[in-house]
Amino acid sequence: MKKSFKKILFTILTVFAVFFVVSCGNKEDAKINKEEVLKKAAEVANDIKSGNKLVNTIMEIKGGVTAEYIIDSSIIIEPFSMKLTLEQKGQDAKVTTFVKDGIMYMSNPVDNTWEKQAATFETIEPFKNALDTSTEIYNMLKDHLDKVDIKEKDGNYVISVPKNSDFIKESLKEQMNSIVGQNPDFNPDNVTWEYVIDKETYFPKVLSLSFEAKLDGQDVKVTTTNTLSNINSVGEITIPEEALNSNN
């Protein structure tokens, strides 16, 4: 694979991982035990063995271009396997990635070929954790329950925090720094955050996040929505023959 394409793909997947593991609320229902709801959601995360996740991210550059990225994935935790497609809305190119049996297969939209390489622990681990958003969220919110609102709506618990909460901003900075390295210039602002879980199963359903920041000297607004579905119902992930037979 050409180094330039590898670098672009790595950057895309890194950004994807940031938003994979990290909207303002209405009046809180006083009858809901906030800590109990969050703790139960974290506990049942261990019961999630597979699922689909759809990530829609819109990046708006002030006075410039707006780009929308769609990431659609199916994940089986053990033994780990995954199919992931990434595309930019309005563009023809689509990158497809498979991981199975310790091998990563990546499509190259430039020349319509497949590349394969060993899937390292560092590569796989963020995606293995992608379906367990509740543990990270519980750890983030447990010391700030006075700022957390939880309401019931349409058979779900809708969890939110006040706009621009300092602890959410700090968590976002930590997530970014842990993946792409220390970036003292990354200071998210106007942050909104909302999390929806199923009232009966406590499985996650939707995580929404938006913020504004200066990235590479440009003012950018990022809005991302993560939707989980088909939990514990993903069938076998099959690698296409052309990927298996690739010599690259």
Image: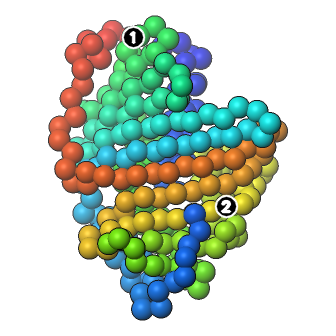
Image quadrant in which you'd find residue 35 = bottom left
Q: Which residue is mark 2?
A: 191
Q: Which residue is mark 1?
A: 113
The image quadrant where one finds the C terminus is top left
Q: Is residue 130 visible?
A: yes
- Callout 1 crowding tier (Cα within 10 Å): few <14, some 14–19, many ≥20: some
Q: Nearer the viewer, residue 182 or 105?
A: 105
- Element marked by disc 2: strand
Q: Amino acid at mark 2?
A: Val
Residue beneath the point at 42% across and 66% down: 196
Q: How is the image coloured?
A: rainbow
Q: Nearer the viewer, residue 211 or 152?
A: 152
Q: Is residue 118 visible?
A: no
Against 155, residue 58 (above or below) is above
Structural distance between the alpha carbons of marks 1 and 2: 40 Å
In the image, residue 103 lies at what x, y percent? 32, 28
